[in-house]
Image (cartoon, grey):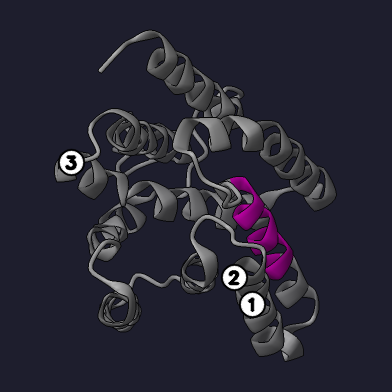
Amino acid sequence: MQSAISRGLSSYSIKLLAALTMLIDHIGVVFFPDVIGFRILGRLSFPLFIWLLVQGEAHTRDVERYGLRLAVLGLVSQPIYRLAFGTTRLNILFELLVGLACLRLTRQFPQLQIPIWLGGAGLSELLAMGYGSYGIGLIFLIRYFRPSPLWVLAWVGFHLVWARLFGLFQLPAIAAVLVFWLANGERGPKARWFYGFYPGHLALLWLIQRMVPY
């Protein structure tokens, strides 16, 4: 008899985890920059957002509407992002938008996969997006996720090479593979709040930063 409780993590559960780890990360950036634990937990967030992007692109009925929503939210979030973090880089929603374009283009033109992914990585660096070519590399890997030792080896190897070239900061993101492995493919409850959470939590952090001396 099948259990009434589904095993594993639904997309809704992963959205909750992505939002929570992002919030923890950004609290650390704004209020506790010297406490490394916030940043370590926060490294899980971006890979989870990418997992959701890959699943969303694969199942959406209207990829243009999906991309437009990312673009609008990215534009709305950018001034708040700059105020909260004091940076000129573009926020992650723009990087997710480029990733969405790469995902759809490689689906439509599979013979051009290598130039499409390299072009996306180059564009992310040229436009100074939040994670640069690292982010596009993650989207590429997660697009071809398989629950196999070979894929995990590629995931770990990518992060080790990146750490060797650019530092150890992203190494904790390796642990995100545990969440991918537990994903059960179910959608779960609707999460209309999810993308609005990004500009909303940035605005809240900025307001608290302005109001509370520390």
Q: Nearer the viewer, mark 3 or mark 1?
A: 3
Binning the other alpha carbons within 10 Å of mark 3 as few (below 14), some (14 to 19) or many (20 upward) gives few
Badge number at residue 34: 3
Label 1–label 2 contact, CB within 8 A: yes
Badge number at residue 182: none
Furthest-top residue in this view: 211
Task: Look at the picture and state if 166 lies above or below 194.
Answer: below
Label 2 belongs to which residue? 125
Measured Cα–Cα span from mark 3 to mark 2: 27 Å
**Quarter occupied by the C terminus:** top left
Picture quadrant where residue 3 is located = top left
For image coordinates 25% across by 45% down, the residue present is 39
The local secondary structure at tag 1 comes to: helix
Label 1 belongs to which residue? 122
- Measuring from the top left, give residue 35's x and y in whole percent: 15, 39
**Quarter occupied by the N terminus:** top left
Left or right: 127 as drawn, with respect to 13: right
**Magenta-drawn stretch contains 58:** no
- Measuring from the top left, give residue 123's x and y in whole percent: 68, 71
201 vs 195, nearest the viewer: 201
Furthest-front residue in this view: 213
Q: What stretch is highlighted in magenta?
A: 93-103
Binning the other alpha carbons within 10 Å of mark 1 as few (below 14), some (14 to 19) or many (20 upward) gives some
> Disc 3 residue type?
Asp
